[in-house]
Amino acid sequence: MKNFKALILLILVTSITTSCFEDNDDTQTPIQSINNFVWKGMNSWYKWQPNVPDLSDSKTDNSTQYESFLNKFSNPKDLFNSLRYQIGVTDRFSWFVEDYIELQQQFQGITKSFGMRFTPVEINSSGDVILYIKHVALDSPANDANIKRGDIINAIDGTTLNTNNYNDLANKLFGETVTLSFVSENNGTLSFIDDKTITASVISENPIFLKKVFNDINGKKVGYLVYNGFRSSYNDELNDTFLFFKNENINELIIDLRLNGGGSVSTAAYLASMIYSSAGTDIFTDLKFNSKHSEQEDGSYNFGNTLNVFDSNSTKVGEQTINRLNNINRLYVLTSNNTASASELIINGLRPYLNAVKVVGTTTFGKNVGSITLYDSPNTDYTERTSANKTHTKAMQPIVFKTFNKDGESDYTQGFTPDIEIEEHQFWNNILPFGDENEVVLKGALDDIRGVTTKTSSTKKSKQSKQLKIKEFKNMFDKEMYIDN
């Protein structure tokens, strides 16, 4: 595991002398200056710039009118949101960044949190709701409190969960301190076990949660990887994992992306290169930008033989030869509605090459577009962090490209539907650890390799249960697909 620094805190300077309109005029206010950066950055890079009237190039023809337009917005975030394209509903993937230093840390798995993920489930017709723990990060407050995958919560800070309050109560799981009430289930009855109070702390989460080999699945050796984020600072650890699989001489591969919301496009290309050696250096994915950047930026990420190694500050520190598997002709991908962006890129990018990419679980999120971070650095067309205006830490993460595979396919905005559908939430009262051969979604893939139809115990399956949607709170970065600056 890498040696990370804690989150860096940067004091926002309140006196800004940078220009709003000429980038050298020191008469403008801080808000005007940042608003100017927001408009110009979006005008240059936004994928849907031609479709947004207020981003028209002619907007700056009259400087007085342009200044008046920007002055309507007292908060740069409001200006940014007003410039997002409405495609039936407002572009839901572009977002404004208050602190790009914190953002870069988040992209590398460094966050202040309890270190656990959960799913809300309505368990009966009375409207009772539980949260089951689907993942606990190592070296996290939740792990220190001995909270485990499969644990069941029915109350938060002393209030029992139901269909009317679960969203507001779940918001507390993104706070500083929370008390959770844990229960067990027997024949539909919940029995109290104990309360646990945990306090959030800064954690550095390695996305490579588990690697394992099943030695005899119908005579085959099956590699299994739980991979929770395409984080470039862990490229070398990912490469080491595939050296392990290569040395084990696996015949089949299962990648568990149920918790993986995406990340770096280049890391996705590296993973694809590790999986399928016969692709050589052919196209893994094509990226298409707006017309202002099509000549410079449009292009492909190809399969390759080497990868870049980065530290937690996204600084390149070396290169490695990619450990490519030699005998994988099909891939099993375990999915959920949290499987998004760069994870979906793996499915879409490998399908033209492998005999099969089998999706096991539930329909993926459906995100075929990606972003770059734009900083207040006009001399570099807003792309260089090192030359950004040092008087503030605001940035933008707008959608700037759409992805296509080798065959020009990109139509998965509704997500990839599973070849083998298994709804994990229906087994909320019997969630097994990752890597357990009887864990319900993993078992679906293993059974398919065995050549048998997946069978699950009816006594463990809750037919009345219903997975509930939960509002996205602070983790916009959790489903991001981006190009490393």
Image (spheres, rainbow, N blue to C red):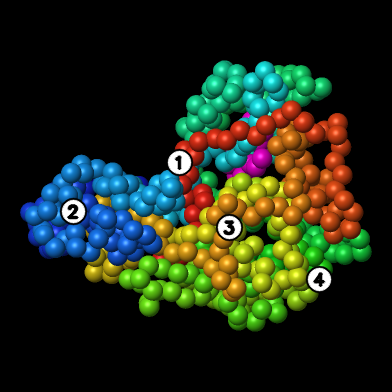
Which residue is drawn at the image coordinates 90% and 54% (left, top)? Answer: 452
**Marks 4 and 1, how far apart at CA:** 41 Å
Q: Nearer the viewer, mark 3 or mark 1?
A: 3
**Marks 3 and 1, how far apart at CA:** 25 Å
Indicate which disc, 3 or 1, sits on the residue closer to the N terminus. Answer: 3
Q: Label 4, on which residue?
A: 249
Q: Label 1, on which residue?
A: 474
Bounds of the magenta segment: 131-141
Indicate which disc, 2 or 4, sits on the residue closer to the N terminus. Answer: 2
Q: Nearer the viewer, mark 4 or mark 3?
A: 3
CB contact under 8 Å: marks 2 and 3: no
Residue sitting nearer the eye, 351 or 108: 351
Indicate which disc, 2 or 1, sits on the residue closer to the N terminus. Answer: 2
CB contact under 8 Å: marks 3 and 1: no
Q: Is residue 134 magenta?
A: yes
Q: Quadrant of the C terminus?
A: bottom left
**Marks 2 and 3, how far apart at CA:** 39 Å
Give the image location of residue 18, x and y in percent.
15, 57
Q: Nearer the viewer, mark 2 or mark 4?
A: 2
Amino acid at the residue labelled 4: Asn
Indicate which disc, 4 or 1, sits on the residue closer to the N terminus. Answer: 4
Amino acid at the residue labelled 1: Lys
Q: Quadrant of the N terminus?
A: bottom right
Which residue is drawn at the image coordinates 47% and 32% (left, top)? Answer: 176
* Residues packed near mark 3 inside 10 Å, few (<14), some (14 to 19) or many (20 plus): some
Q: Label 2, on which residue?
A: 33
Q: Label 3, on which residue?
A: 412
